[in-house]
Amino acid sequence: MVTAIVHINAEVDRIPEVAQTIAEIDGVSEVYSITGEYDLMAMVRVSAYEEIAEVIPGRLNKVAGVLHTETHIAFRTYSRHDLDAAFSIGLGESD
């Protein structure tokens, strides 16, 4: 699984519409409205690196109202679930 975090600047009056359109793109798992330099953040999860090009420049960047994107590729994923599982190994009750 390849995960990309995409920061998005959008036309201010179209942010909800842009977010909804991006959320409907195959490969986009979530879209968040965020504070700071960017308006939106999209999580893209695909099975191969080649698919990133199809999803981000191929579809996401072409959504009407998207002004600019900045993409970050994740090397590893650390989630609370993964960390809890890793730290619980061998910590069961002793006999």
Image: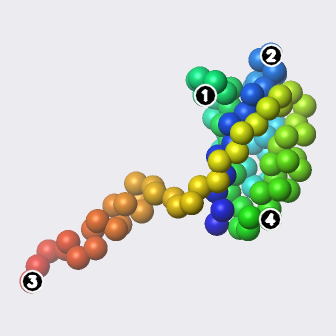
Residue 17, visible in the rendered structure: no
Q: Nearer the viewer, mark 1 or mark 3?
A: 1
Q: Earlier in the sequence, mark 1 or mark 3?
A: 1
How far is the residue under mark 2 from the one under mark 4?
A: 33 Å
At mark 2, the secondary structure is helix
> What residue is pinned by disc 2?
13
Quarter of the C terminus within the rendering:
bottom left
Q: Disc number at residue 34?
A: 1
Residue 28 vs residue 93: left or right?
Answer: right
Residue 38, visible in the rendered structure: yes
Q: Tell me what residue is drawn at x 70 percent, y 45 percent.
A: 71
At mark 3, the secondary structure is loop
In contact (CB < 8 Å): disc 3 and disc 4: no
Q: Earlier in the sequence, mark 2 or mark 4?
A: 2
Q: Earlier in the sequence, mark 3 or mark 4?
A: 4
How far is the residue under mark 1 from the one under mark 4?
A: 27 Å
Residue 34 position in % (x across, y down): 60, 28
Q: Is 46 in front, or is 57?
A: 57
Q: Earlier in the sequence, mark 1 or mark 4?
A: 1
| Quarter holding residue 42 | top right
How far is the residue under mark 2 from the one under mark 1?
A: 15 Å
> What residue is pinned by disc 3?
95
> What residue is pinned by disc 4?
50
Residue 28 position in % (x across, y down): 73, 50
Q: Is 43 in front, or is 95?
A: 43
Crowdedness near tag 3: few (<14), some (14–19) or many (≥20) residues, C-alpha within 10 Å: few
User: From this viewpoint, which residue is outermost toward the bottom?
Assistant: 95
How far is the residue under mark 3 from the one under mark 2?
A: 63 Å
